[in-house]
Amino acid sequence: MKSSWKLLWGMKSRTAWTGGVGALALLAASVLIPTDAGARPVKQPLHPTVVDQNAQGRAVVSIHRVGKRMQGKMMVAGRNLAPNSTFGVSVAGVHIGKFTTSGAGSGAARFSSQPTGHAQFLGVDPSGSLLEVSDDQGEDVMEADMPDDTQAGDIQCCLPDECEETSPDECAAENGTNMGAGSCFPDPCPTTPPSGDIVCCVPDAGE
């Protein structure tokens, strides 16, 4: 059965962003996240820096389980930025993507661990990290400390076919491998080597 879905931006958020955001609101409303029990949507405002004190923005992140794997989506949106300009997006000081503003100074970037269309690749869990938006000179114009929603004391536990965020005792009870503190996105567990017959190339008998 397919998971139910909801809008990434709720009515309350759209109301707060009315006026001058037209296309941005529509873009944000088009991004969906699952509402199943494994979803962890986090909405966080982006705060302006001294470089551009009029800048406003928001980041929305969802890390959720699909089958036995964790997947992630993120939207970074801004307004009151320099028009027709390119802005970079960084997590923990590492550049992960960019977006270009409209003539009105609004723009947004979509990220996904399974990107389609204009979405950019998301290969890091932003939870607990500093997210920054920088201008084409490398100066940060907006930033936010993303909340860390992991349970205190939980570790990455590698089981035979999946990663679970659980306590060290529970991991040991399931005969899992403790990979230390952190998120199961991206998956830290080593890929299980293929089992069974293999193709073996040997020299010709006459050589």
Image: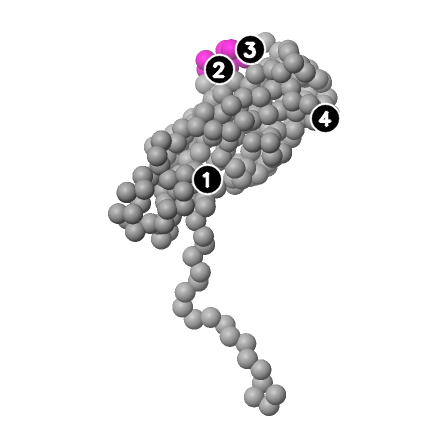
Q: Amino acid at mark 3?
A: Thr
Q: Quadrant of residue 203?
A: bottom right
Q: Amino acid at mark 4?
A: Asp
Q: Amino acid at mark 2?
A: Ser
Residue drawn at the location 36% of the way across and 31% of the way down: 152
* Contact, mark 3 vs mark 2 (Cβ under 8 Å): no
Q: Is residue 186 above or below residue 58?
A: below
Return the disc, 1 or 4, that comes first in the chain's sequence: 4
Return the disc, 3 or 4, that comes first in the chain's sequence: 3
Residue that label 4 marks:
136
Residue 204 shown in magenta: no
Instruction: Report how far apart the C-alphas of labels 2 and 1 lie in the structure.
Output: 27 Å
70 vs 167, nearest the viewer: 167
10 vs 38, nearest the viewer: 38
Residue that label 1 marks:
185
Instruction: Name the disc covering residue 157, or none.
Output: none
Instruction: Report how far apart the C-alphas of labels 3 and 4 lie in the structure.
Output: 27 Å
Residue drawn at the location 39% of the way across and 31% of the way down: 150
Q: Position of residue 137 (x, y in %)?
A: 73, 25
Q: What secondary structure is marked by label 2?
A: helix
Instruction: Name the disc covering residue 13, or none.
Output: 2
Q: What secondary structure is marked by label 4?
A: loop
- What's drawn in magenta, residue-wise? 11-17
Q: Amino acid at mark 1?
A: Phe
Q: Position of residue 164 (x, y in %)?
A: 36, 42
Q: What secondary structure is marked by label 1?
A: loop
Residue that label 3 marks:
18
Return the disc, 2 or 1, that comes first in the chain's sequence: 2
Instruction: Report how far apart the C-alphas of labels 3 and 2 lie in the structure.
Output: 9 Å
